[in-house]
Image: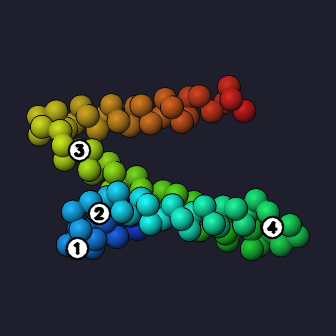
């Protein structure tokens, strides 16, 4: 939830300055997510630091959801937006939640 809210707030601030704020928000938070994710995987012996870095990584990874969902809905005609949002959530869950157990 924190990543979605942070992404929405940053994108709304950036919309005043640039035309492609959704893409910029996703790109800006990908860099710290990759760096902290690398540290989480490579830290040994300091569990509390690894958990804090994991939380930061997750927040940074989820910042792209709200701006890109908003962007994808703004290009859809208003009468199709509800169907489009439902389809987007369905496909996200099919590609993420449904396929995960067989892969693991």
Q: CA separation, marks 2 and 4?
A: 33 Å
Q: Is residue 75 left or right of residue 14?
A: left
Is label 1 in a helix, a strand or a loop?
Answer: loop
Is label 4 in a helix, a strand or a loop?
Answer: loop
Percent across and percent down for residue 57 are 60, 63
- How crowded pointer 2 is (Cα within 10 Å; few <14, some 14-19, many 20+) is rated as many
Q: CA separation, marks 1 and 3?
A: 21 Å
The reply to whether callout 2 and callout 1 are in contact (CB within 8 Å) is yes
Q: Is residue 30 left or right of residue 68?
A: right
* Residue ID for mark 1: 17
Q: Along the polypeptide, which appears first: circle 1 or circle 3?
A: 1
What residue lies at 26% left-to-right and 50% top-to-bottom?
A: 71
Q: CA separation, marks 3 and 4?
A: 40 Å
Percent across and percent down for residue 90 are 40, 31
Q: Along the polypeptide, which appears first: circle 1 or circle 4?
A: 1
Q: Nearer the viewer, mark 1 or mark 4?
A: 1
Q: Along the polypeptide, which appears first: circle 2 or circle 4?
A: 2
* Residue ID for mark 2: 21
Does residue 3 appear anywhere in the picture?
Answer: no
The reply to whether callout 3 and callout 4 are in contact (CB within 8 Å) is no
Residue furthest to the top in view is 102
Is label 3 in a helix, a strand or a loop?
Answer: helix
- How crowded pointer 1 is (Cα within 10 Å; few <14, some 14-19, many 20+) is rated as few
Q: CA separation, marks 1 and 4?
A: 38 Å
């Amino acid at each position: 939830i924190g990543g979605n809210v942070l992404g929405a707030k940053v994108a709304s601030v950036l919309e005043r300055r640039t035309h492609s704020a959704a893409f910029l928000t996703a790109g800006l938070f990908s860099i710290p997510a990759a760096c902290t994710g690398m540290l989480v995987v490579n830290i040994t012996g300091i569990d509390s630091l690894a958990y804090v870095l994991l939380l930061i990584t997750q927040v940074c990874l989820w910042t792209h959801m709200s701006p890109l969902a908003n962007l994808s809905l703004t290009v859809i005609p208003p009468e199709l937006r509800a169907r489009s949002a439902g389809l987007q959530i369905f496909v996200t869950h099919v590609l993420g939640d449904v396929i995960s157990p067989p892969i693991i």
